[in-house]
Amino acid sequence: MPRNRSARLAVLGAGVPRSRPVSYSSRQASAVRRRIVAGVLVLLSIALITIYFRESSGGGLHQVQSVGATVLRPFEVAADRVSRPFRDAYGYFAGLVHAKSENGRLRRDLDKWRQEATQNAYAASEKTDLLKKLHFVNSRSFPGGFGFVGADIISQPPTAFAQQVVIAAGSASGIRKFDPVVTGEGLVGTVVRVTHKQSLVALLIDDTTSVVALDVKTRAQGIVKAGSSFDHVGKDQRVEAGDKLVTAGWKLGGLSSIYPPGIPIGQVTAVGQNDVDLYKHVKLQPFADFKTLSSVLVLIPKNR
C-alpha cells in the first residue's frame, strides 16, 4: 500500500471521535430518577387535594383557583364562541339523521296500521254480510220448501252490458239452471249455466232478466226489467214512491215460477203517467248492492 494513503487513513481515523456505550448502571439510575419524580408528583398532588378540601373557602388554594379561573375565563369564552358553530352544525346533521330514521320508522308503522285497518274493515264487512244472510235465512222472507248453498263470486261482469258473474259452486253442490240467487238484502238473479264446480249467474240488473213482482202495500203487480223499472203496471193500479217490491211467484199444479214468492227486490223511487200510455212509468232501486257483491246464496228446492 502506498505511504501517503496509509497516512491519510491514520489522520481520518484519529479525527473521528468514538462514542462510548452507555453502561447498565447509568440506564438503571435514569429509571430510578424518573420513578422518584413521578412519586413526588403523586404525593404532591395528594397533598394539594387534601389541603384544598380541608381549608376554608377563603384559603390560599381556593384563591389561586379563583384567580386562575378569572384569568382563563376570556380564553374559555373565546373557545366556546369558536367551537359553537361546529357544535351547532354537528347537532343539526345529527338531528337530520335522527329525523330521517324516525321518519322511516313512522312510515313503516303507518303502513302496518293501514294494512291492519284494511284487514279489519274487510273482516267487519264480511261479518256484516254474513249476518245479513243469516237474518234473511231465518226471516219470513226466506221461501219455505227451499234450502241454500253459499258461494263466492270468482268472476265479475266483463262489460257494463253483460251483467253476469261466475260463482264457485255448481252441479256438485246441487245447483241447477234457473235456480234463484239471493243475498242478505234480497234478490240477486238466477243461474243460467252450470258446470260441475262453477255456475254462471245473470244478475237482476242484466238486460235479459225479468221478474214478476208485487207491491207489498197496494198489491199492484208488474214486471221488473233489468232491475231498474217496474213495467206493465196498469193506470188503475196504485203505486207510490217508497213502496217495496217482492217476487210475486205462483204455483199451478206441479208447475211453479222460477222465483218463489216474497223475496225482496227493491224500492220504488219514482212514478209517472201519461194519458196516452196504457201503463205507469215506475222506477225502482234494487235492495242488493251489486257494486260490492262478493258472495251469494243459491236457493235449492228441498223436494228436487
Image: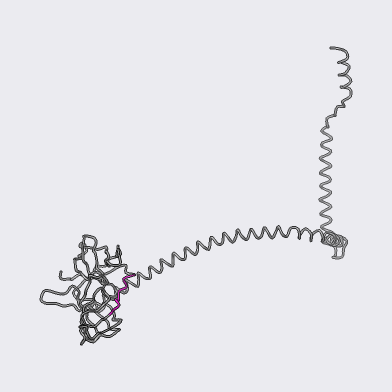
Q: Quadrant of residue 290?
A: bottom left
Residue at 83%, 39% in the rendered image? 30
Residue at 42%, 66% in the rendered image? 118
Q: Quadrant of residue 69?
A: bottom right
Colour scheme shown:
one colour
Return the residue nearer the eye: 206 or 151. 206
Q: What quarter of the picture does the N terminus occupy?
A: top right
- Residue 258 relative to residue 76: left or right: left
Specify the farthest residue to the left.
253
x, y (%) of residue 14? 89, 22
State yes or no: residue 244 in magenta. no
Which region shows up in magenta? 283-291
x, y (%) of residue 133? 29, 73
Return the residue nearer the eye: 194 or 2. 194
Return the residue nearer the eye: 20 or 134. 134
Q: Is residue 273 above or below residue 68?
A: below
Q: Is residue 277 above or below residue 198?
A: below
- Residue 16 relative to residue 106: left or right: right
